[in-house]
């Protein structure tokens, strides 16, 4: 049996240019050098450094499995180096996502976000890597659901016998730190009842139920770290990432992309406190602008071959997505006109890490009872 391959994406915002807009190229160079050294020492098989808005993204392949302390420490030390450089360049928010001083075995709970998949490579292994800025992990619920459970998006659920039995969803309750599994299509309505509450229940992994991929091998994985809970106060939305395997009994790459074909609404945007449309962008538009957004998704496609990354393809750099982008810009206009009113501004309980507690304290003695 050939060795399994692990694909790890670990990301952090360690400082950016012109406010929270985009990573400085020097930070990417530093990360490149750091991962190159790790590859030459045999820790990594391959890597690709990129960014999504103000988040530095380390895409890595290796043989060390999910949650490897070696790989997580490498990412942590790389972010530390980049944060130091960000400080010396006086970049904005230098070191923002590095919430603790010392590394302790795994980046989880320390600020950076991570998504990982370990698998036995198929003869050809296409993967899509999605990175989002100015939004939260639950924003992946809708597109991942569409890729793996919605026949109006993934035609293979109807047409391909290898997909016809559907997929299994692992859903995390990120507030109570517990998980539950749903088999689709038969438990589709149960699944939807939970994952519609995006700030509370998030799809963590998806598993195939038929076809050639082993049933215990995840075919999609989403980062679920919640910065505000880790830090105990608001320090920015956690800008999630996801890894999705595709083709040959899994959703075709085109079906994986079809899930982003309309600008659905997500929480995040300015100050992590507003609802806005998700815009799929190619590298050319891979940074936020208006009102610190709107939330963006950037996607890269690779073939993983003997743990090497062949590619990337800039997945949304295509006129076929121009209509979504235009609709998203129109929606952004529409939502912005609400100013500080819901549903553009998030409900109060999702604003608890911003000004609301202070404001409540300020007026606490001014409330008069109604007769
Ligand atoms: C959203 C985000 C930005 C900041 C905003 C204020 O995730 O990062 O919208 O919240 O630019 O930032 P500060 O408080 O750093 O001036
Ligand atoms: Mg930032
Ligand atoms: Mg960000």
Image (cartoon, rainbow, N blue to C red):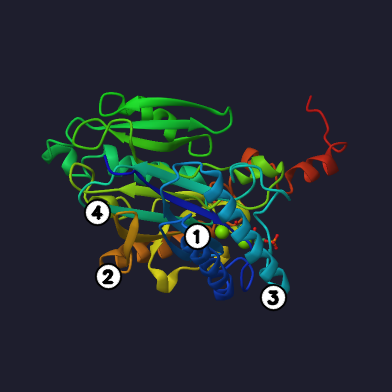
Which quarter of the figure has residue 210?
Answer: top left
Question: Which one is closest to the eye, mark 3 or mark 2?
Answer: 3
Residue 41's tag is: 1
Are the residues flagged by discs 4 and 1 in contact, CB closer than 8 Å?
no
Question: Which one is closest to the eye, mark 3 or mark 4?
Answer: 3
Question: Disc 4 to disc 1, how far (Cα)?
Answer: 33 Å
Q: Height in image: 38 above or below 221? A: below
Mark toward the start of the polypeptide (3 vs 4): 3
Question: Disc 3 to disc 1, how far (Cα)?
Answer: 29 Å
Tell me the residue that label 3 is attached to.
Answer: 89
**Residue 222 horizontal/vertical position (percent):** 44, 44
Mark toward the start of the polypeptide (2 vs 4): 4
Q: Quadrant of the N terminus?
A: top left
Dot 4 falls on a residue whose secondary structure is helix
Dot 3 falls on a residue whose secondary structure is loop
Mark toward the start of the polypeptide (3 vs 2): 3
Q: Residues within 10 Å of mark 1 (few under 14, many from 20)?
A: few
Q: Does the beta carbon at disc 1 come under 8 Å from ligand 3?
A: no
Tell me the residue that label 2 is attached to.
Answer: 319
Q: Height in image: 74 above or below 158? A: below
Question: Which one is closest to the eye, mark 4 or mark 1?
Answer: 1
- Which is more toward the observer, 158 or 218? 218
Q: Does the beta carbon at disc 3 come under 8 Å from ligand 2?
A: no
Tell me the residue that label 4 is attached to.
Answer: 253
Lateral position of residue 370 relative to residue 333, left or right: right
Q: Residue at x 51, y 43 (%)?
A: 68
Q: Does the beta carbon at disc 4 come under 8 Å from ligand 3?
A: no
Q: Height in image: 15 above or below 60? A: below
**Residue 55 horizontal/vertical position (percent):** 55, 61
């Amino acid at each position: 049996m050939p060795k399994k391959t692990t694909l790890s994406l670990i990301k952090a915002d360690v400082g950016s240019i012109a406010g929270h807009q985009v990573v400085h190229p020097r930070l990417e160079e530093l990360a490149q050098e750091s991962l190159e050294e790790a590859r030459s020492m045999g820790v990594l098989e391959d890597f690709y450094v990129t960014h999504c808005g103000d988040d530095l993204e380390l895409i890595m392949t290796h043989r060390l499995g999910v949650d490897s302390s070696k790989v997580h420490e490498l990412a942590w030390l790389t972010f530390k180096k980049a944060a130091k450089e960000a400080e010396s360049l006086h970049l904005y928010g230098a070191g923002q996502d590095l919430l603790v001083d010392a590394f302790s075995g795994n980046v989880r709970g320390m600020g950076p976000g991570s998504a990982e998949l370990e698998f036995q490579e198929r003869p050809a292994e296409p993967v899509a890597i999605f990175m989002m800025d100015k939004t939260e992990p639950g924003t992946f619920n809708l597109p991942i659901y569409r890729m793996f459970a919605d026949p109006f998006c993934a035609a293979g659920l109807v047409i391909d016998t290898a997909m016809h039995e559907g997929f299994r969803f692992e859903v995390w309750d990120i507030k109570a730190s517990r998980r539950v599994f749903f088999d689709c299509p038969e438990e589709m309505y149960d699944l939807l009842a939970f994952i519609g509450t995006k700030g509370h229940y998030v799809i963590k992994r998806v598993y195939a139920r038929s076809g050639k991929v082993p049933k215990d091998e995840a075919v999609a994985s989403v980062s679920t770290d919640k910065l505000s809970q880790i830090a105990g106060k608001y320090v920015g939305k956690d800008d999630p990432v996801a890894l999705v395997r595709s083709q040959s009994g899994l959703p075709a790459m085109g079906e994986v992309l079809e899930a982003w074909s309309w600008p659905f609404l997500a929480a995040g945007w300015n100050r992590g406190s507003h609802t806005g449309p998700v815009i799929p962008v190619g590298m050319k538009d891979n940074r936020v602008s208006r009102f610190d957004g709107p939330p963006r998704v950037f996607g890269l496609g690779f073939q993983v071959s003997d743990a090497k990354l062949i590619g990337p393809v800039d997945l949304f750099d295509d006129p076929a997505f121009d209509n979504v982008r235009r609709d998203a810009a129109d929606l952004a206009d529409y939502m912005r006109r609400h100013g500080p009113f819901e549903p553009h501004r998030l409900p109060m309980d999702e604003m608890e890490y911003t000004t609301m507690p202070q404001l409540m304290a300020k007026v606490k003695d001014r409330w008069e009872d109604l007769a």
